[in-house]
Structures are given as C-alpha cells and as structure tokens.
Amino acid sequence: MADPKIEEVLAPFRASVKEQGDIVRQLKESGALELDLKKAVAELKARKKILEDKELELAPVEASFDRAKMEDLLKRRFFFDQSFAIYGGITGQFDFGPMGCAMKANMLSTWRNFFILEEQMLEVDCSILTPEPVLKASGHVDRFADLMVKDEKNGECFRLDHLIKAHLEKVKSDKKTTSEVKLECEDIVVKLDGMNKEEMRVILRKFEMKAPLTNNELSDPMEFNLMFSTYIGPTGLVKGFLRPETAQGIFVNFKRLLEFNQEKLPFAAAQIGNSFRNEISPRSGLIRVREFTMAEIEHFCDPTDKSHPKFSEVRDVQVLLYSACNQMDGKAAEIVTIGKAVDDKIIANETLAYFMARIQQYMVKVGVDTRKLRFRQHMNNEMAHYACDCWDAECLTSYGWVECVGCADRSAYDLSQHTKSTGVRLVAERKLREPKTIDVVEAVANKGIVGKSFKKEAKEIMEALSKLEPSTVAEVEESLKNNGKYVLAIGANSYVLTPDMLEVKRYQKTIYVEEYVPNVIEPSFGIGRIMYSIFEHNFKVRSDGGQRTYFSLPPVIAPLKCSVLPLSNNADFVPYIRQLSRDLTALDVSNRVDDSSGSIGRRYARTDEIAIPFGITIDFDSLKEPHTATLRERDSMGQVRIPLKEIAGVVRDLSYDKMTWTDVEAKYPKFEQQETKT
C-alpha cells in the first residue's frame, strides 16, 4: 500500500499529469490539428517525466545497495568487463568472464525449458548476416537511422535530436531569454521528431550550438544507420547487415515452420541469438550496448481468435500494470490479476496477457525482485502504426525503470511486408463452415508466344502475371482494350505485352478453405538487461561491518551450484574431496573445489562473492564412521550435517527447486561447532 505521506507530496504532480492527459484526449476527440496535438503530447511527456522522477526520489532507498561496490565486485570477480580492455576498451561492448558466462548460460537454459519445452515451441537458429532486401521489407533500412554531428576537433559524435533538445532546454531556462525565443524553443522541440536533415542543420546553426564538453565547433548533420552494414561475398555487390533483431529470421521461414507444424495454427517459434545496433552513445553498462543477446518468441495465431488454451492457468496471476490510461491520468501503477485486466480490456487479448504472466513468472524465477517489476503499456504516440497493443516489462534499477522485455501484438505487419517484397504468400488457411462460391479474375499468359518473345525473362513475366491482384487485372484488361498493349513493370525492368500474349479470364469457383495472414504476438527478451537487473536486485552486504559483499542469486541460475572445501590441506581429505566432486558432477551439479590456503571463513566469503549457493566442508569428523560433511547455505549461512552418501543428491534437489533449505534443516541436524584439528 502506498505511503499516505508520499502520496500527499505526489498529489499535485499527479493532478498536473491528469490535467494535461485530459487536454490530449479532448484534442483527439475534436480532431485538432496535428501540431497542436504534438505540442500537448510533448507537454504530457514532460509532466510524466517530472512525476516519475519525483516518485523515484521519494521511494524508500535500500541502504544495502551501493552501485560502486557492486560494480567493483563484478569486475574483480570477472563476471563481465569491457571488451579489449588492454587496448583501451570499446564503449558499449563487454566480455563475459567464467562466472558471467555460466550465469548467462543458466539463464538461457532456464528460458529454453520455461518457454520452448513447456510451451512446445519450434526453435530455430537463423543467420546473423542478413541481406538488405529483407531489412528493407521489414522497415529497418528506412527506420533505423539517426542524424548525428561530430566535434570538429576530437571527432566525438552526438545524436543530433538529443543535442538540440538539451541545448534548447538550457536556452529556455536562461533568465535572459525572451518569451518569444522560449516559445520558439518549445515549438522546435515539439516538431523535432518530424524534421529532416536540412531543417535540423538550420536550427543547429541559428542557435550556434557547440560540442557540450569541449565547446568546439560541430560538423553539419550526417545520417547514421544504427545497423552494422557489410558486403556478402568477394564482389561487394550483395549488401547486407548484422541483424538488429532475431525476429526476421523467423518471419522469412514462416512457410517452412507452418508446414513442419502440419499447417496448424496457433504455434510459436523461438530463437536465441546475438543482435547488433551501432548505438551512437552506448551507456549504463549492460543496459545500452552494441552487441547483445536476445531471446525472442513469435506466436502466430488467427486474427479472429486470440484466445489461449492455457489462459485459465494464469488468470489469477497478479501483475503490476502501468496502463496508458493511468499514465495519462497521473495515477500510479496498479496490481491486478491477468484475468481482470483482460476482462476490463486493459490488455487487448488472452494470448498477449498469457505471455505477460509467463514473462513475470520467468523473471521472478531467475531472480528479479517482484516489487521492482512492472508492465508499462505503450501510449498511442509510442506504438508502431501496425501494433494493436504493446507492454514493456520494466525493472527498477539505480538507473530508473529499465525496459527488459517487450511484449507486443504486431498484427499481420511482418508477414504482409515480406509477402509484398517477395511475392511468396506467407499465409495460413482456415476451413470454412460452409463452402463458398467466389468470382475469380486472372491474367493468363499464352506461354508459347511469351516464351518466344521474351525467352529468359518469360518465366519471371508469367509468375508476375499469376500474382496480380484482381484490381490490377482489371487495369490490364482496360489497357489491352484501349491501348492495344499493357506495360508490366518488374523491379527496374518494363515489358510490353500485347493482346495475343495474354487474356483475362473470369469464372466462378467453390472454395472450402480461405487464406488469411496470421497475426503475431511477440515477447522479446533483452538478456543483458535482465542480467544487470538481477545483479542489482540480488547484491547484498553482510551486516557484520559492511565489508563482505555477495550476490544472492537463485540456485537455478547461479554460475556454480556448490563449492567443496577441505577444512585444511590434510592429505586424508583428498579421497573424500575427489569422490564428492565426482558424485556432484554425475548428478549435473556444477561444483568447484577450493583447497587454497586461508581460513574456512575467508574461503566461504570468496565463494559467496561468486554467488555459489551451497558449500560442502570436509573436516575431521568426515573421516569417522558414519562419514558426514557440513552443508552450508549462502544467504542464511546456516549449516547442517549430512551423510556423505546423501549430500550430492540433496544439493542437486536444492539446486533445481525440488527441495528448500527449510526442508533440509527440518530433516538433518544443525551443525554447531567446527572441529579445528590440523
């Protein structure tokens, strides 16, 4: 429940957002000018940002969290570090060390079990190198470009729209600025998203903008595509890109996947792999990088039926929803059940809601704090024109709320675009309740004459004619009748067709099935961002002086499940240590033997730092009948005594959620005192 004192402070900020939200609604309803609507939306965004900043400022601060300490631990124990560090490093690129690599692998393994296996999805692994026409059809070639400027002396780059916005905010806040100039600044900020390169260049020069840090002159604007471009093959003729997302590989293989699934819908395909975006100014560690791992699902379904057969299993799952309506009204996010959110039409359909519930369950399983997880709905001005509904699973970190998973209803956009681009019909069929008679009109080529006239191009021409839409066929018929010819355009080439080369046929046929373009529900996971959130949510400091830090990671994703520690370097311990490590490995429990010098307490601290949840200590009591060992749990530091022949199985059950530490403490005697012979 919200703190009444905090809500009292936030009340005027919420009222301010609601006031502007109501203005935006009124402008939409009255069909106001686009510019007026843009200004109102820009003001709404500004007020929302002030409210969210105030909410974060007033939120209770966790005394135990210290980002500098956490980053020191991550670097010191080589969870990850900047790539090519000995050469000075590359911004926005990171290498995962042994512990980070193992943790990431465990996260992906859990994801694969949780989604691909449990939901019986079809997994694919598609090429990273993507030809330009694929990304042209998807819209990435045109959309994935930003304007930037360079510092003329040191070459540092800045994203132009961000630079202009920041500079104009400074101008507006200057007391010497006239009201006319302030209004002009506001007007520019509103129009900025729709401005072209020349318009931005004029503003850059008019306000005499300089490089923020050096005050050096800036270059003219230049286009910067966020995709890494390359050429495929030695000729340099086939342009390509490193993929900016994994989804397109699934879409272009839809026909094969549908065939593999025996032509049945709905079905889901999934892919785990790296994607690349050439960010102008990457920042915030793993949150904004140039190379990142994605895990994406494309769930294909009938647009007339977006129910989900397993929805009843998640209907009562509670989620924290920050709906578009609440954002416009200045209200806080609300906890509701998934079922109620669908019933009240807050979430568009059952399938989208089902995946949102499953996303939350996965995030919590791998260590995200439920109290710091919310789903924020995209407002209308944020959503792509083709999207029906879109929610982001956001995690609260020291950087604020960070988008970690997107879950969108992308309608039929992607399959339709690739169909238009290739002429290959990416469609499914549904059986009609009753047969239907339809009128057919088609352009039929005279193969003999077309073959003689166009030779090598004949096949391409006949294929193009067979794919013409009925409206285009009508144009062909009219042109042949009135002009005695029809000019067929295929790419950059044109072919003149005469009446003897083709005829237009009309007839009726009875159909028993109809084609439709499936819709797509897409959950898209940014693994690096989730990983960073988990680090923050699970970073702990021991209460004994505040010097001992560790990660309280869930066992399922912990890099190593168990450490094996001899109390001393006594040679009699060696056979027991080796046998125990073999037993653990045989049960698929990753483990590490630490027989280095140092007290047992110091070695426990070292294993805690790399998030090992369980530690087995072999001591002098282990040498006696019945042979037993100490099992320690990382978070509580509680210890129990367990027979050696049982201990590997217990650790396995603890590691894979088949048993809890409470169960273990109830079954085995607590360990009270360590024998200290040498």
Image: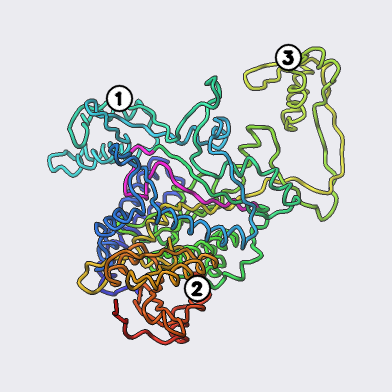
Measure the C-alpha gap from mark 1 to mark 2.
Answer: 66 Å
Give the mark nearer the N terminus: 1 vs 3.
Answer: 1
Classify mark 3: residues with Cα within 10 Å, few (<14), some (14-19) or many (20+).
few
Q: Residue at x 60, y 60 (%)?
A: 351
Quadrant location of the C terminus in the rendered image: bottom left
Secondary structure under the numbered disc 1 in the rendered image: loop
Disc 2 target residue:
648
Disc 1 target residue:
220
- Say which amino acid is labelled 3: Val
- Say which amino acid is labelled 1: Asp
Q: Residue at x 67, y 16 (%)?
A: 494
Q: Residue furthest left?
A: 176
- Asked whether, in this view, residue 187 is left or right of residue 125, the answer is left
Measure the C-alpha gap from mark 2 to mark 3.
Answer: 79 Å
- Asked whether, in this view, residue 401 is left or right of residue 466, the answer is left
Give the mark nearer the N terminus: 1 vs 2.
Answer: 1
- Contact check, label 1 and label 2, Cβ < 8 Å: no
- Say which amino acid is labelled 2: Ala
- Towards the viewer: 632 or 502: 632
Q: Position of residue 474 (x, y in %)?
A: 76, 27
Please say if 492 is above or below 118. above
Q: Position of residue 201 (x, y in %)?
A: 31, 27
* Mark toward the viewer: 1 or 2: 2
Quadrant location of the N terminus in the rendered image: bottom left
Residue 496: image tag: 3
Q: Is residue 60 visible?
A: no
* Mark toward the viewer: 1 or 3: 1
Q: Residue at x 25, y 41 (%)?
A: 166
Q: Which residues are magenta?
A: 279-300
Secondary structure under the numbered disc 2 in the rendered image: helix
- Contact check, label 1 and label 3, Cβ < 8 Å: no
Give the mark nearer the N terminus: 2 vs 3.
Answer: 3
